[in-house]
Amino acid sequence: DAGVIQSPRHEVTEMGQEVTLRCKPISGHNSLFWYRQTMMRGLELLIYFNNNVPIDDSGMPEDRFSAKMPNASFSTLKIQPSEPRDSAVYFCASRPDRGGNQPQHFGDGTRLSIL
Amino acid sequence: AQSVSQHNHHVILSEAASLELGCNYSYGGTVNLFWYVQYPGQHLQLLLKYFSGDPLVKGIKGFEAEFIKSKFSFNLRKPSVQWSDTAEYFCAVSSGATNKLIFGTGTLLAVQP
């Protein structure tokens, strides 16, 4: 099993540019989560999907952020336009079923720097 | 609303010292409890989990945690730490059948050789 795969691993871009982060969950996992990690706020849940449907996006900071899951094996998190305060590590995680007692498996993260 | 508190933000220990990291949660119903570890520059990895049964849970790398329902606590322990245990440790809770994990703010552990 390849685990949760995120790309890119690192991205540096100028403010105002569009940023797209990608995630491939573990095959067979039907819940997918996007997190943001910063020194100031720790680990924050941005949004999660179940069976490709967004269930809770209350953690999405503002309209500049959007997430999609067009199929069971792919999700994107987009920031448009990006700002320096969006600099963080963004993690994707997946889990096998709807139950709360299954652990989430995390990807290696995307380290995003907005200049 | 659910919340998770980790009281120790930074812990510095010498090798072979014993470790206990505190975790308290606020939720009155059935909970699922987790400890994750994040080594420098890496992603979060599951250390151990509690769903039901024996409240003393053993995880990987010699870690264990005890669920004390009356205290709403799930403290992480290790009798003798190693330099390689230097990492950040996160306690997390989910309730019932929900998918959401609520994470604590993390405890940064530095083990001095």
Image: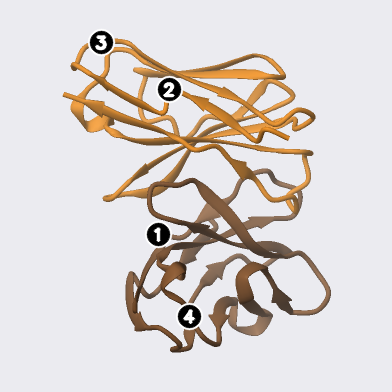
Chain colours: A orange, B brown
Labels 4, 3: front one: 4
Q: Position of residue B62 (x, y in %)?
A: 62, 76
* Residue that numbered label 1 is attached to: B105
Question: Which residue is tagged 2?
Answer: A8
Spatial CA distance of label 4 from label 3 is 45 Å
- Subunit that carries the residue with mark 4: B
Task: Name the amino acid type tagged 1.
Answer: Thr
As measured in the structure, the alpha-carbon distance from the residue carrying label 1 to the one carrying label 3 is 30 Å
Left/right placement of residue A85 relative to residue A106 reads left
In which chain is the residue bearing label 3?
A
Q: From what the image shows, is residue A59 above or below residue B82?
A: above
Could you tell me how far apart the alpha carbons at marks 1 and 4 are, in whole angstroms? 21 Å
Q: Is disc 3 in contact with disc 2, using a CB cutoff of under 8 Å?
A: no
Q: Alpha-carbon neighbours of circle 3 within 10 Å: few (<14), some, or many (≥20)?
A: few
Residue at 70% across, 31% down: A26
A80 vs A57: above or below:
above
